[in-house]
Amino acid sequence: MTIPFNHVLAIRSAGSLMPASTQNKVEVSDCMINALRIDNGLKLINKTIDGVISESEIVPNANNLPLNATNSDWSVNTEFYAMFNGDLEAGPLSFFGNEVDSIMVRRTSNRKGFKQWEDVNLIEDITSRIDDKFNYSFYDRCVESGIIYRYGLQPISQEKRGTLFQGGNTNVVYEDIFLVGENGKQLKIRFNPNITSIRKNIKESRVETIGSKYPYITRNGNVGYKEFPLSGTITHFMDTTEEFAPRADIFIEDEFIDVGYDMSSDYEAIYRENNLTPYNNQILEREFREKVVDFLQDGKPKLFKSPTEGCMIVRLMDVNLTPNSQLGRLICDFSCTAIEVDEYNLDNLEKYKIQER
């Protein structure tokens, strides 16, 4: 058979690859094809023959296609990928004759019985954000400890969605308490985390009448939120990965961070001159503490994550600091009251800009 097409990446026949494209077509004969993949945008190599520059053939690599092709072998440039499994499926990245303009990352979990899928992250402008091996990084900071999740990718073209391609099951079990604020800014309460009580507030009232020995109890059925004290120790060691406060930005006020000046090297020289180590560095502890206090007192809803209490959207009130006098006030303990203000779900996380989709 002859297949007219500009760029053919590879053809597998009985475990071996057939000759590649010549003059915009592929000719295959006397073989059985079990997978065919066609990509666009391939860079053809020019070669010189007798001083004349001509377009070379695309020589397939035996590793281009596996013996048992799967959906995971598509690249962002794949136009056609037929695996001849008794169906008409031949690739998700160009369908209905339209180019795919975005990809939606979706997830489900064992809480949903792996039946109800939710949109997690929209990958727009995919040609610039995804490389030819379909590599793209997205960090989902809003997962619950010990819950089994399953993620999938769904191509979108002109607001029409294609087939959802599912990955395997995954889970995370974390040890610490986390607070996640706007734009996914995450603070790990690593040292001395403490919750002494949890109260679920329910609106009830007691009415004592003249003619009855016992009171009447009335309840507002809509009210039901949790409230608990939260405390821990603030030290730069709770952020060794610099995920919360990169050291290059820690000495710059937030409104000037985008200036791009890295102060860390300047302060490293100050540390050396004054024999300041990570264990006695009052300057670093002070600046880091200010960043943490600003975060705790910004008045914005946060995602509270804990392996024992689960996930809640909370507001923090009554934030207090207690310097550790035994360490010369080098570090401080903090305490506050966390009040649940909304239901934990992806819609509300987007509403409060904790994780945008």
Image (cartoon, rainbow, N blue to C red):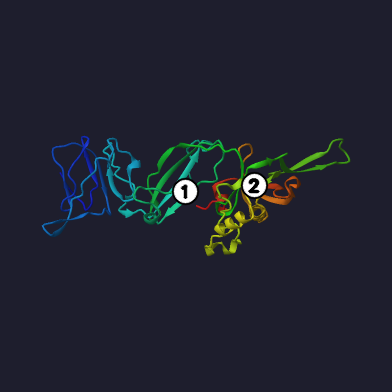
| Number of dots carrying numbers | 2
Left or right of 336 on screen, residue 24: left
Tell me the residue at 43%/49% (across/down).
104
- The amino acid type, in three-letter code, at marker 1 is Phe
- The amino acid type, in three-letter code, at marker 2 is Tyr
- Pointers 2 and 1 in contact (CB under 8 A)? no
- Mark linked to residue 279: 2
Counting from the top left corner in percent of width and height, residue 345 is at 56, 46
Residue at the limit of the structure toward the left, as seen here: 50
Left or right of 135 on screen, residue 250: right
Which quarter of the image is occupied by the N terminus? top left
Q: Nearer the viewer, mark 2 or mark 1?
A: 2
Q: Is residue 221 visible?
A: no
For marks 2 and 1 on the same chain, the one whose residue lies earlier in the sequence: 1
Task: Using the image as rendered, state which of residue 357 and residue 73 is in the foreground.
Answer: 73
Counting from the top left corner in percent of width and height, residue 157 is at 37, 53
Question: What residue is shown with label 1?
Answer: 138
Task: Determine the CA span between mark 2 and mark 1.
Answer: 34 Å
Query: Dot 1 surroundings within 10 Å: few (below 14), some, or many (20 or more)?
Result: few
